[in-house]
Image (tube, rainbow, N blue to C red):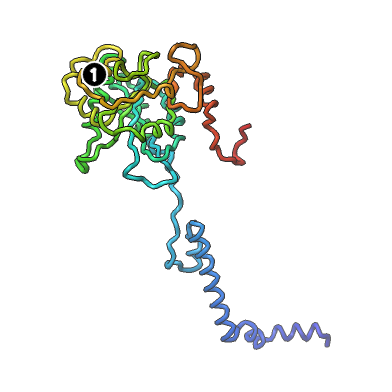
Amino acid sequence: MSESFRFQKMMMNPNFQKVLMKPTRPERSAFFIFSFFFLLFLCVVASINGVRIDTLLKFGSCTFFSGNSSSNNNDFLNPISTSGAAAAPDDDDIRILIGILTLPDQYNRRHFLRMIYGTQSPAGAKIDVKFVFCNLTKEDQKILVALEIMRYDDIIILNCSENMNKGKTYTYFSSLPEILNSSDSPSSPPYHYVMKADDDTYLRLDSLVESLKPLPREDLYYGYVIPCPSMDPFVHYMSGMGYLVSWDVVEWIRVSEIPRKHMDGPEDKVFGDWMREGRRGRNRKTAKWAMYNYPEPPTRCTHELWPNTIAVHLLKNQEKWIQTLKYFNVTKNLKPSKLYHIP
C-alpha cells in the first residue's frame, strides 16, 4: 500500500478528524486571548483616528471606548458667520454685524458675496454678514427669497418700501435693537459694532478686525471720511461704502427724534448729520487710506490696490471684482485635490 494512500485513509478516519478539529485547552485559551487583544487593538486604532467603529461593533463590543463622531457635513448650509477656526470662542472677541444693503432681485450678487465672505475667517472676532432690503413686491421674490432664507438664513427684510435715500438706512439701524436684543442677556449687546455696507464693496475682514481692536466699543463712528481730501472725521461724514458704529449708537438711533425727523437725502451724509446734531460719535476713526475706491477711473477718492487694505469700493462689474480678488490672492488656501486641476 502506497504512503499517499495510507495518509488519505488516516485523514478519513473520524477519530483522527476529531483530534485535529478539537484544539487542546491551552490552544483554546491562547486563541481567545489573541482574539480579545486583536479586537482591543482595532478599537484603540479607531478611537485614535476619530473614525466610527460601527463596523467593528459587528465583531465585538467596544463600549469602553468613546469614538469621535464624524464631522458635520452641513457647514456649508450655515449662514455667513465668520470666526477664527483655530481658537475657541472668547468673550473678548469682537462681535460685528455687517448689513449689506441690496435689492431683492440681486440673487446673483448675493450668491457671489456669500463666497467672498464665507471663505474669510478672521481671528479674534465673530462676524455675521446679512443682506438687507425692504418688503418684497413680486410673486417670484416671495418664493426665491424664502428659499434663500431657508438655505442660508442671512437675510433681513425691513418693513419699508425699497429706496436708497429716503429712510432705508434709518429703518435698518432703528430696527436692529428690537430684532436682536435678547431677554436672556439684557446687559450684553448682541454685537459690539454694526456696519452698513454697499454690495459693490469688498471688505477684508482680517484687516477690519485688526483696525477695530484698539478702538473703544462705545460711541464709535468709523469709516472713510468724506469729502475725499479730508482726513478729519469730526468735520465731515463717513462714506456709504461702509461705515460702522458701536451698539450704543444703534440703540440711540432707535429712540432719538433727530434721525426720525431727518431721513431724506444722501444716506451717508444724512447719517453724519444725525451724529453731529445728536452729539454722538465722540470716538471717531477714519480708515483712510485703507478704504478707497477702485483705481479706475482715477479720482480723488481712488487708490492703487495695496496690501494694507480694509475695503475697496465701486466694484461695479465682474472684471473689477476679479482683478481685486486676484490681487489679494483670495484662493491661496485652495487645497490640492485629484478632483480638480486649476493652473
Q: Give residue 212's position: percent from left, percent from top.
A: 36, 32
Residue at left offset 24%, top offset 40%: 188
Q: Nearer the viewer, residue 106 or 232?
A: 232
For residue 140, say whether it is visible: no
Q: Quadrant of residue 128?
A: top left
Q: Nearer the viewer, residue 270 or 229?
A: 229
Label 1 crowd (10 A; few <14 / some 14-19 / many >=20): some
| Residue position for label 1 | 276
Looking at the image, residue 100 sits to the left or right of residue 335; the answer is left
Quadrant (top left/top right/bottom left/bottom right) for the N terminus: bottom right
Looking at the image, residue 216 sits to the left or right of residue 119; the answer is left
Q: Quadrant of residue 339?
A: top right
For residue 14, say whether it is visible: yes
Q: Give residue 226's position: percent from left, percent from top.
A: 35, 15
Total numbered badges shown on the rendered structure = 1
Quadrant (top left/top right/bottom left/bottom right) for the C terminus: top right
The answer to whether residue 65 is above or below residue 83 is: below
Residue at left offset 50%, top offset 63%: 56
